[in-house]
Image: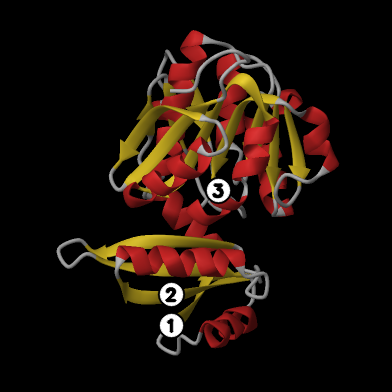
Amino acid sequence: MSAARFTLAVPGLTLDAAQELADRIDADPRLDAMAVTINETDEAASLWETVAYFAQESEAESARALLERPEALISPLPDTDWVKQSLEGLAPVAAGRFYLHGAHDRHRRRAGGISLEIDAGTAFGTGHHGTTEGCLLALDSIAKRAKPRRILDLGCGTGVLAIAAAKACGTAALATDIDPEAVRVSLLNARLNGVKPMIRGVTAAGLEDPRISAAAPFDLIFANILARPLVSLASGLSRILMPGGALILSGLTLDQTRWILATYRNRGLVPAARITRGNWAALVLTKPRPGQKSR
């Protein structure tokens, strides 16, 4: 019998309330959620739900009690069902030169451009979300003007951004995640996409791991995570970004961009671009070179 996953879903929320609850779950180590998402359930009524994923039913029940959310629904989600069903429902995504698809759409690869085959497996995310699409579009624009040589994908998930950067720039990338399973799946996906020697996977929380420090500074950093962790990481990310380098931040709703931009401007970074997909945004910031004035 395969190991099951369980979801804890809190429905009937506003977007702000859903994001706030997701941030709370993500930041509380007692809850030990494998992943957290927010989903729009009723566009007309602007209703959202927050969904947390747990390895064990007891962990989901404990989270419901800690969150004081008796209305939250706990449901089993077998690995063999949710991965297969989610992938079969995902159409390929074209983002600039990048063409992102699952194994079930391998036959639809384009002759030109850069194809990326990503299946979630036991890590969370396939890259089809608007936040990842925004990051790919930002990468496409950057890679046309320069070839970053030191790349960090912080919170790599399935490794899609590290793999895309390695293929587009022809250079190695460091892929880190707090979840060792995400790192394992990222390396499997790197092998599937022919860039395994170019991807180094590291299980690490935040930026304090010595392996990250040793590889710094970076001239391209992806941080496709949530708004609150991005605020906490602002000083560290600004410090390890090379002068002239680009920092791509995502996992943000449109109403969070002003908060994030103000936070990173206070660390000396300069906004360069904003890419939106639906209610989601990806921000590109740069670090001025010595003698270069900030805008």
- Specify the farthest residue to the top: 145
**Residue type at the position of mark 1:** Ala
Which numbered disc flags the more N-terminal residue, 2 or 3?
2
Q: Indicate the quadrant containing the C terminus: top left, top right, bottom left or bottom right.
A: top left
Q: Which residue is mark 2?
A: 9
- Mark 1 lies on a secondary structure that is loop
Q: Which is in the foreground here, disc 1 or disc 3?
A: 3
Q: Which residue is mark 1?
A: 72
Above-or-below relation of 41 to 183: below
How busy is the neighbourhood of tag 1: few (under 14 within 10 Å), some, or many (20 plus)? many
Q: How many marks?
A: 3
Q: Which residue is mark 3?
A: 230
Residue 183 placement, left or right of 106? right
Kindly indicate whether the residue at mark 2 contacts the one at mark 1 (C-beta within 8 angstroms): yes
x, y (%) of residue 168? 55, 17
Q: Which mark is residue 182?
A: none
